[in-house]
Each structure stands twice: as structure tokens, then as C-alpha cells.
Image: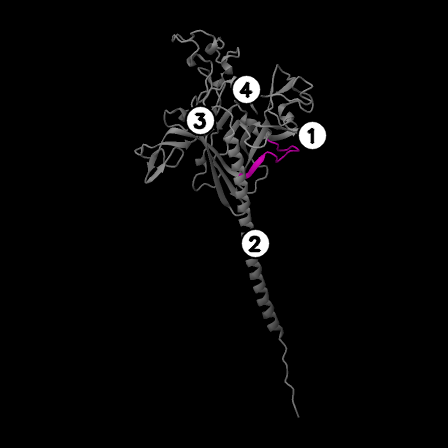
Amino acid sequence: MKTSAIQRAYTLVELLIAATIALAVMAAAAALFGLFGRAASQSQSIVDLGDRMRSTAWQLRQDLAGATADLTPPGRPERDAGYFELIEGPRSDRDAAEGSGDIRADTDDILLFTTRSSGGPFVGKYGANFIESPVAEVAWFCRPAAVQPVDGLTLHDLHRRQLLVVGYVGVPPFSTNNNSLPATAPNTTLPAAWLTYDISMRTEGPAPVAAFFPNSLGDLTRRECRFWHDASAFPHAFDTSTLDAATFNGTLREGEDIMLSNVIAFDVRVFDPEAEARLAGSVTVFPGDPGYETGDPSPAARGAYVDLGWGGGTTPLQSAGAAVSNAPASVQLPDRTFDTWSLHYEQNGLDEDGDAKTDEGADGFDDNGDDRADDAGERETSPPYAVLLRGLEVRLRCYEPSSRQVRQITIRHSFLAN
């Protein structure tokens, strides 16, 4: 008589143990896959940031390479060369000090200049159509982002406004109004008009303004004709207090002017051939670097990219720079500003320096008693920095929120080759 083997089933305890082990393995696998997924996502975010930074750097290099102005002030309107202006804000790259929770550095520098395209023409909006020109007026500046992805940290958007330089516009509404745009609804102000017409324009005549006129490069040597400058009062300062309104934020064109987001530094520096190197311990430092103030000046090497008006000496680019000769503080430029300026102010029939005389630098007389007529010392105005701007360095730095990493790209451009 045969007996069959008795097959035992799993007990409930054994099933629970097996299920627990399986769940633990699955949780570990899910965590591992999640880790790989986050790493891949962060890596892609860093790659995307790098691509955007390189694209922005390429555009800035193209703009600088096409700069039309003579970089030795003052400019002459009859040369039809446009302008170049750099405003050095109060912040510096050292504001993001080591150990500080705020890694935001120099975000208040502003670049404004005219540039000529080396390839295809610049394209801008013209009503419901588009307009082209080989020359444009561009403005590069930062504004705090509308949405901040990181609590306690202010990130910025880098904006680039582009206005085409078209001295004569041969199509309506300009051609039907003596080459001007009537200041009627909805174009009652220049900010409103610039939403529809990407053209460099100026206001002329007494208030209320009757029309807006397109600028030529010669017109743009005058500060009052430029983008976002105060046309009502000399020296026609760039209005830094209303920069938010200079963007497309809050309009139907929102985002069109944003080149880069999550910016923590847009640090524009000028090349000063007289800036001295120093030794901080065994490290060579330059103006703006930690330890420079107490460093040893014995290296005697010169030449560095520095903040405009960095101070600490007597070389031309170290000083704050005055905009008007012998004028009160009320008519000085409020910021450290390099400007190619214009000799137009010596021939415009206005008394810019408030001495009850007009155009002493071009009246044919020896007004200052030095036996020379119409020399530079007689001019009513003077460029803030009457020296050649040899080159620029722009340090562009961004923060990537998902990976919490910082990336920087540096653009250098020599104007001696322009």
C-alpha cells in the first residue's frame, strides 16, 4: 500500500514575511530609480542652463562686435556713429561675500549702445507687420524675476531691449505724418508706442508731445534721444528708478525681451591699463578682489578689468566721473557712467552749465583767457570719462535651483579691434 507525500502550504506568517521583503526590495528599487531620475533631471537642467548661457553670451558678443560708436569721447553728431553708454550701479561682485546666504552679486550694471549686424538685419515689430534694419539700439539690464523659485534668494531676469535705427520710415503711419508717429491713443507715450513699433524714437517740441520721431545714428549721440532717458532736463539721465516699466513684463509681449533667467550676476567691467596688481599672501589680486585694499603693491604689474569708478587712486577710470564741467550736483549724472557723449551740447544754443553764457566752446572767442579760442577747457559740458574705452569684461552668473549649482560664463571684448 503506497502513501502519498504530504505537501505543506505557506503559513500566514511566512507570507507576511515574504511580502514585507518584497515591499522593501521594491521600495529600495523605487528610491534608486528616483535618485537616478533626479540626477538625470538635474543634469539636464544644468545642460539646459549652459546652453542658454552660451546663447546669451553669443548674442552679447555679436552686439559688442558691431558697436558703431567711436569709443573716445566726445562724439560728433555729424559722424553718424551712434553711442555707447555703461552705467555702473552701486552693487559689486563682492556683495556675494563668502558665507553669505545671499549669493546675488552685481546685478545693477546697465549696457546701452548702438550696434550694426554682421549678418542678417535686425527684425522688429511694426504694427501687425515687421520691419528690418542693419542697425539697432540695444539695452542690456537685469530686473528681479516676477516668480522667485528659491525662498530668501532674489534671482533676476536679464533683459535685452532692441529698437531698430531707421532714420526714415517710408510706410504708414510714419510716412503720412511727416516721418513721425502721432502721439494719439494707444501711442500716447513712448513706452506704449514701443509695444507696437520696435523703432528707436525720440520726442520733440513742447508738452504735450505731438509726435514721436525715428532716430538716426547721429540723433542718438544726444542723450535725450536715447532709450529710457529723461528728455526734459540736461544731462538727460537714464531712469533707473522705473526700469520695471522698460520691460515687456505685464504686456502681451511678456518674455520676448528676456535673454536669461535665474541670474545672480551681470557684472560689467572696463579695462583700466593703469589698475595695479597687488599680492595678498601668495595670490595676485586686482581691484575688486578680496584682500586688495591691504595687499602688497610690490608686483607693479598694471592692467586689469575693474568696476568703473572703482576708486583708490588717481587714474581716469578710478574716479566717479563728472558729467558737466563746473555744474552743481543737481545736474550731474547720478551713477558712474561711461558715455561717448556729444559735441552737440557745445552748439545747441543752450546754457548747460548755468553761467549765463551759451556754447562757449564753439563761439570763436577766447572765453577763459588762455589765448586759445574754443579749446576743450571752454566747453560747457564734458564726458564723464574723457578717455578711450579699450575693452569690456562681462561676468554672467546663474543659479540652477533644482541642483543648487552656480554656473558662470565670462565675455571679454576689445574695442581696439572694432
Question: Looking at the image, which is closer to me, 89 or 213?
Answer: 213
Give the residue at x 49% y 27%. 87
Tell me residue 64's x, y (percent): 50, 31
Q: Which residue is mark 3?
A: 389
Magenta segment: does it hold 87?
Answer: no
Q: Residues within 10 Å of mark 4 (few under 14, many from 20)?
A: many
Of badges 3 and 4, the one in the foreground is 4
User: Which stretch is magenta?
Assistant: 247-262
Q: Which residue is mark 4?
A: 218
Tell me residue 66's x, y (percent): 52, 29
Q: Which residue is mark 2?
A: 37
Distance Cα–Cα, label 1 vs label 4: 28 Å
Q: Is residue 302 left or right of residue 27?
A: left
Which image quarter: residue 167? Answer: top right
Q: Earlier in the sequence, mark 3 or mark 4?
A: 4
Of badges 1 and 2, the one in the foreground is 1
Q: Earlier in the sequence, mark 3 or mark 1?
A: 1
Q: Earlier in the sequence, mark 1 or mark 2?
A: 2
Question: Looking at the image, which is closer to me, 416 or 411?
Answer: 416
Distance Cα–Cα, label 2 vs label 3: 49 Å
Residue type beneath disc 4: Gly
Distance Cα–Cα, label 3 vs label 4: 20 Å
SS assignment at label 1: loop
Q: Which residue is mark 1?
A: 128
